[in-house]
Image: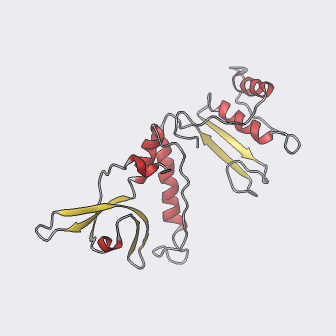
Amino acid sequence: MASPDENPPASNIYLSEEWSKAAVSITFGSQNSPRPAVLVCGPKNSGKSTFSRHQLNVLLQKYKKVAFLDMDVGQTEFTPPGVLSLCIIENSSRDPGKYLQCVYALYDYYRDELCKSESSKSSMVELPLIVNTPGWIKGSGYEVLVKILNASIVGLGISSEESPDIHLCVGLGIVRGVDLSKGLLYVITPVPPTILEKVDVLLQGFIQIPQGFLQVQG
């Protein structure tokens, strides 16, 4: 899956003019030729991975999807080392909605398939999750992050004694996890514990994420 940002950071990898012309020729050389199948071979440290990555990006300028058969198990491109893989790379730089669908589908698979016990589908297994997000927090990249994070950001409310329909929001929290077997909800929040212990309502809906939430404070 290509990045959802329309202006990703420029790469510092050097690519010779000869290689660059070869990638363009393979992709756009003939309109009547069948779809290209490119086999990249050479000794170690000859630039096979660099050229393969560049060729992939050039092909995505013409084709919506490109298949990538990775036989280099020592230095894989899209999977952990030691894995033979056939990946379908789709250029979604102009379709953030498609990018989000893929993100949600992967998370749903993690939650509904990987986190459930094989002996009992109703019980959950302990499987920590690390989510690595793109470093682009402006433009379309920011919009994608906001839509992803809004699914897990909640308002922390305290019920009012005067009216059951009125709640005092004391801050925001990120839902880190849910333990159904223990009835526990894990929330990350800067709200002090003395106030947090009074929270009895989670408020959901559209919550605007502050810009500073996604930026590094120097």
Q: Position of residue 155 (x, y in %)?
A: 30, 60
| Residue drawn 52% across the image and 42% down it | 136
Q: Residue furthest front?
A: 218
Horizontally, residue 195 falls left or right of residue 188, namely: left
Which quadrant of the rendered structure holds the N terminus? top right
**Position of 47 relative to 17 (above/below):** below
Coloring scheme used:
secondary structure
- The structure residue drawn at horizontal position 67% and vertical position 30%, both measured from the top left corner, is 58
Relative to the observer, which residue lies in front, 172 or 53? 172
Image coords of residue 92 (percent x, y)? 53, 38
Residue 43 placed where, x, y %?
89, 43
Count numbered badges in the picture. Answer: 0
**114 on left or right of 190:** right
Q: Quadrant of residue 114?
A: bottom right
Q: Nearer the viewer, residue 125 or 16?
A: 16
Query: In the figure, 167 relative to 193: above or below?
Result: above
149 is higher (above) or lower (below) than 142: below
The picture places residue 28, in percent across and down from the top left corner, at 69, 22
Q: Residue furthest right?
A: 43
Closest to the observer: 135 or 182?
135
| Picture quadrant of residue 198 | bottom left
Task: Please name whichever residue, 67 or 175, is drawn nearer the observer in this view of the structure.
Answer: 175
When asked about the image quadrant of residue 204, the answer is bottom left
Residue extending farthest to the left is: 162
Residue drawn at the location 31% of the way across and 61% of the way down: 171
Asked whether, in this view, residue 79 is left or right of residue 190, the answer is right
* Residue displayed at 47% across by 76% down: 123
